[in-house]
Amino acid sequence: TAATGEVTTPHVPTELPPRIQHFIDGAFVDSVDGGTFDVLEPVTNSTYLQAAAGQKADIDRAVHAARSAFDDGPWPHLLARERNRILNKIADIVESTDARLAELETYDSGLPITQALGQARRAAENFRFFADLIVAQSDDTYKVPGRQVNYVNRKPKGVAGLITPWNTPFMLESWKLAPALASGCTVVLKPAEFTPLSASLWPAIFREAGVPDGVFNLVNGLGEDAGDALVKHPDVQLISFTGESATGQLIFANAALTLKGLSMELGGKSPAIVFADADLDAALDSTLFGVFSLNGERCTAGSRILVERSIYDDFVRRYAERATKIKVGDPHDPQTEVGALVHPEHYAKVTGYIDIGRTEARLVAGGERPEGLPTGNYVQPTVFADVPSTARIFQEEIFGPVVAITPFDSEEEALRLANDVKYGLAAYVWTSDLERAHNFAQRIDAGMVWLNSHNVRDLRTPFGGVKASGLGHEGGYRSLDFYSDQQAVHISL
Ligand code: NAD
């Protein structure tokens, strides 16, 4: 529906680059065929930049550079201490430019500025964390007395292909770049085509920190062109992918041709289960944050809330009331809590699900374009109640500020509902009965469970999903293992 109000104009960062290029072997370059694609900002949906549209020829150049840097350059052979220093420098630079980074991210992706700032800091932390891990790392040695010594010789795998999505793009790129580089791999990064702006900062950051040419390469472009060529390239040893489950399936099939290592962080439809004995105020705060922070464009969003029947009506009423008070607006305004969705295509997907939801469940908050924001990809925080488990809004990932609330009568029913989707990324359990919390958590099909808490996690813990939410776990030494070969060396005594 139409809303009244002025057409908003976005805050435009100063000194935007004139265009976005690839970065290959230490140099900024255009696509071999000169092709570009449009980059939009989500407040007016106008094209503000052209980015180089990478094709197979560009991926070939980037992989060649990464391969040469791996085979002939110093990077894989540096002492852990030396790589640690460079990674810490990267972290320092990211931290010192966090305001600029957040400004660009907000402009390109529509993320509220205060939340974009948090993501920039987290990106710096990822580099510090993996820098620390590599200097503390030890490998195993096994002795068979009088007969044999066996030890593990850890080696970087080679050229890592990194393919990332448009939600919190810079931070998610850092979650792959940091362990790949820490392990001694060289990389080709293919960022998401909706949001290439913040990735264009990496080359200067790496150069200033002293990363040798060819170690980090960046190719922009569409998934079906640049991404596809990276997945199929015979000289790329592994692909770390974050994105939709359907894309993950396609990549899985395409990577089979060259038998690549794969790490996949995919979609989610994570449940928050609220029992009647929970601290309701805390559960309300957390479940609102869980689906409405980061514009709901968050893989671990608690997008289904299962509530015990005896508190259901009260919970739904209070939740809907709070949701209508969330401030939707200009992503650059520090007061804004929900900004603009990333792209008109994604906006159409999310509003399409809201239309479907109206036919499947009871709308108790939102559902419209917010007042005063007649243009741009703005959606009111939207709450559906009485959502049956057969509903599409219960089963499918919407990836926006839309939540489905469903009542349950028993612990068994709550567990059945929690597990009744194809995904298994995260889950949140709210109860004051600790025994129940642990027993319930351990039976949920989810890679990560938060008890009476949300989303803060120690970077040493496993990160990843089960079922359609992913393949493999990263986090802590698991990430370094993914980017490394562990050769067993045996010698007789
Ligand atoms: P997407 O799958 O559309 O795209 C992700 C990346 O894959 C992009 O860079 C895209 O260009 C590339 N790509 C697309 N087709 C390709 C192909 N055929 N070959 C190679 N690369 C290809 O995902 P998106 O819409 O950018 O991101 C949102 C999705 O990411 C959601 O499903 C969300 O849950 C998921 N996600 C998961 C996590 C996690 O850690 N589990 C984190 C963030 C986002």
Image (cartoon, grey):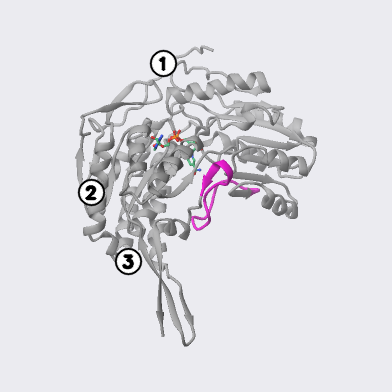
Foreground residue, 42 or 101? 42
Using the numbered discs, state the Cα–Cα distance from disc 1 to disc 2 in whole angstroms.
Answer: 46 Å
Q: Position of residue 338 (x, y in %)?
A: 50, 30
Q: Which quadrant is the N terminus positioned in?
A: top right
Note whether 312 is above or below 475 in the view shown: above
Q: Is residue 413 above or below residue 36?
A: below
> Which residue is the extreme one toward the bottom?
146
Q: Give me the residue at 47% from left, 81% from top.
A: 143
**Label 3's element?**
helix
Judge whether 75 appears above or below 378 on screen: below
Q: Are marks 2 and 3 in contact (CB under 8 Å)?
A: no
Q: Which residue has dot 1 on it? A: 7
**Amino acid, disc 2:** Ala
Tell me the magenta residue range. 451-471
Q: Which residue is mark 2?
A: 65
Question: Label 1 amino acid?
Answer: Val
Mark positioned earlier in the residue sequence (3 or 1)? 1
Q: Is residue 49 toward the left or the right of residue 334 in the image?
A: left
Q: Which residue is mark 3?
A: 81
**Residue drawn at point x = 41 percent, y = 53 percent:** 125
Residue 315 seen in this snapshot: no
- Neighbourhood count class around disc 3 (C-alpha, 10 Å): few under 14, some 14–19, many 20 upward: some
Residue at horizontal 34 percent and vertical 55 percent from the top: 181
x%, y% of residue 108?
37, 31
| Residue type at tag 3 | Arg
In this view, the mark in front (3 or 1): 3
Secondary structure beneath disc 2?
helix
Q: Position of residue 353 (x, y in %)?
A: 57, 23
Q: Which is more foreground, mark 1 or mark 2?
A: 2
- Observer-nearest of 46 and 21: 21
Whichever of labels 2 and 3 marks the residue nearer the N terminus, that label is: 2
- Disc 2/disc 3 C-alpha distance (Å): 25 Å
